[in-house]
Image: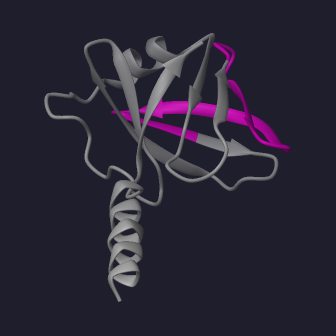
Amino acid sequence: MKSMLIFILAFTSLAIAQQPPTDFPEGSIPLTAEELKSAVADKVFTAQPVSGTAWRLQYNRSGYFFVNVGSFSDSGKWSTKDSTLCTEGRQVKYFCNEFRIKDGTLYMKRENGEVLQMVLK
């Protein structure tokens, strides 16, 4: 019985530890469309979801993006409006993600609500 209780507590702790953040960091602020465009244009980022493979995201100033996640890759057009970055790939439908910035670091909120830190490569 004691070992079963230890297992349940360990599993519960692991499950709690693996919950993705759904709030932007305290003190993070939205960007204007131009600020966001300047923050990502001609840059490459990585982002690590709580579960799954790390993402590689490249936003060219020309308005084209490239994404690699494990063996999946896509490319297409990107644009900004307010504090959101919108993409439409060849394989992935049109969607927008909200971005915020804090201390020079960008954060993106995924469609599922998870907030990812965008790490500049």
Question: In percent of the image, x 47 and y 50: which residue is there?
Answer: 110
Where 98 sits versus 12, above or below?
A: above
Residue at 21 percent of width and 28 percent of height: 28
Foreground residue among 79 and 26: 26
Q: Nearer the viewer, residue 71 or 11?
A: 11
Position in image of residue 120 (x %, y %): 53, 14
Instruction: Specify whether 72 is left or right of 97.
Output: right
Q: Relative to 65, is 21 above or below? A: below
Residue at 31%, 52% (x, y): give it: 22
Residue range highlighted in magenta: 60-86
Q: How many marks?
A: 0
- Residue 51: x and y in percent read 56, 53
Left or right of residue 22: residue 54: right
Quarter in which the C terminus is drawn: top right
Residue 36 position, x and y percent, is: 41, 21
Snapshot quadrant of residue 59: top right
